[in-house]
Image: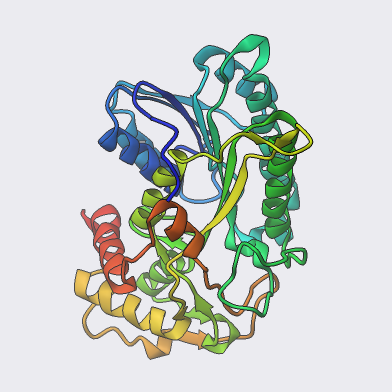
Amino acid sequence: MKVSNVSLEGKTIFVTGAAGFIGSNLVKRIFQDVTNVKVIGIDNMNDYYDVSIKESRLSDLSKNKDFNFVKGSIADRACIDKIFRDYKPDVVVNLAAQAGVRYSISNPDVYVEANLIGFYNILEACRHSYDDGEKGVEHLVYASSSSVYGSNKKVPYSTNDKVDNPVSLYAATKKSNELMAHAYSKLYNIPSTGLRFFTVYGPAGRPDMAYFGFTNKLRAGDTIQIFNYGNCKRDFTYIDDIVEGVVRVIQGAPEKQNGEDGLPIPPYAVYNIGNNNPENLLEFVDILQEELIRAGVLPKDYNFESHKELVPMQPGDVPITYADTLPLERDYGFKPSTPLRDGLKRFAEWYKNFYMAN
């Protein structure tokens, strides 16, 4: 087990993408667990998906007097530098990014702006947080993705695997983030940890994710498309498990130490956070349907078969995602474990309340 070397008590934490799915749940958890803590959040509130969900998340967070929100983009260098000057964050959690594999095929510009330029701005701000003898950032934690594994044949995916063959620009930007963080950790001794998230789902999630999109379409009476004729497997990871992993990782930064040459050994690490239990897409869809009926989102006599179409694999997709979580268990004593049915049940109940309450 890693020694917990970053206390959050009395600290200022900067969370980018704070109105996002993972970001908002992380901020909520920090305030739940830690007393005397300040959180600075930034989000550009773009309309990549239903902004009302982001506004709802933000409304919940804004009830806490120690939460300060900045509407802005991490690609705006002046904005990021001002946040670091004004608040001097002790911990940075970079979750802001343009998400989505398929969207990156048709809209590459936004991925370069948010995921490359934006992350560069965060790294530069962390670098200069040590200027003039300041103690600077204690730990930079940032979101990577299971997409970096591309079409790797070996499963489960290990962080020791070679990941030099991305099959989407989104994946390429996430791998670039890991490389950039490594360089900055080496050059400027910034403790950094990348987290490769595996198919995160749950209440108030992202509408572009399959479970959410399927629900919208089924409710509207449309047909859902199941790619690769249903022969895909995904390591679905419930949001609370993701947040638990992030909170633990934040508090255990890679140690700063010098090598035999007297130069810093990069205080750098990368972990998978996944459920370590890939589910077949057809089985996943069956469970989703059952939970949507149970929650009253769909009627009991819903003709599911007539709204299902099996189609070929989409560009940028991979047949399986499967996380090796042993390093996370070894270093932080944690492994995601929420069963898929439990997670989809909570999503279906949230969906009913959010969209159908009136």
- Pick the front one: 355 or 169: 169
Question: What x and y, as percent, mark residue 24?
Answer: 40, 41
In the image, residue 258 above or below residue 310: above
Question: What x and y, as percent, mark residue 227?
Answer: 57, 81
In the image, residue 336 above or below residue 119: below
Which residue is drawn at the image coordinates 35% and 21% (left, top)? 10
- Residue 200 appears left or right of 288: right
Q: How many marks?
A: 0
Question: What x and y, as percent, mark residue 135?
Answer: 56, 17
- Residue 60 appears left or right of 117: left
Question: What x and y, as percent, mark residue 43?
Answer: 52, 34
The quarter holding residue 75 reads: top right
Residue farthest along the front direction in this orientation = 260
- Pick the front one: 207 or 41: 41
Which residue is drawn at the image coordinates 75% and 38% (left, top)? 260
The quarter holding residue 25 reads: top left
Q: From where the camera sits, is residue 102 visible? A: no
Q: How is the image coloured?
A: rainbow
The quarter holding residue 11 reads: top left
Which residue is drawn at the image coordinates 24% and 76% (left, top)? 293
- Residue 291 appears left or right of 41: left
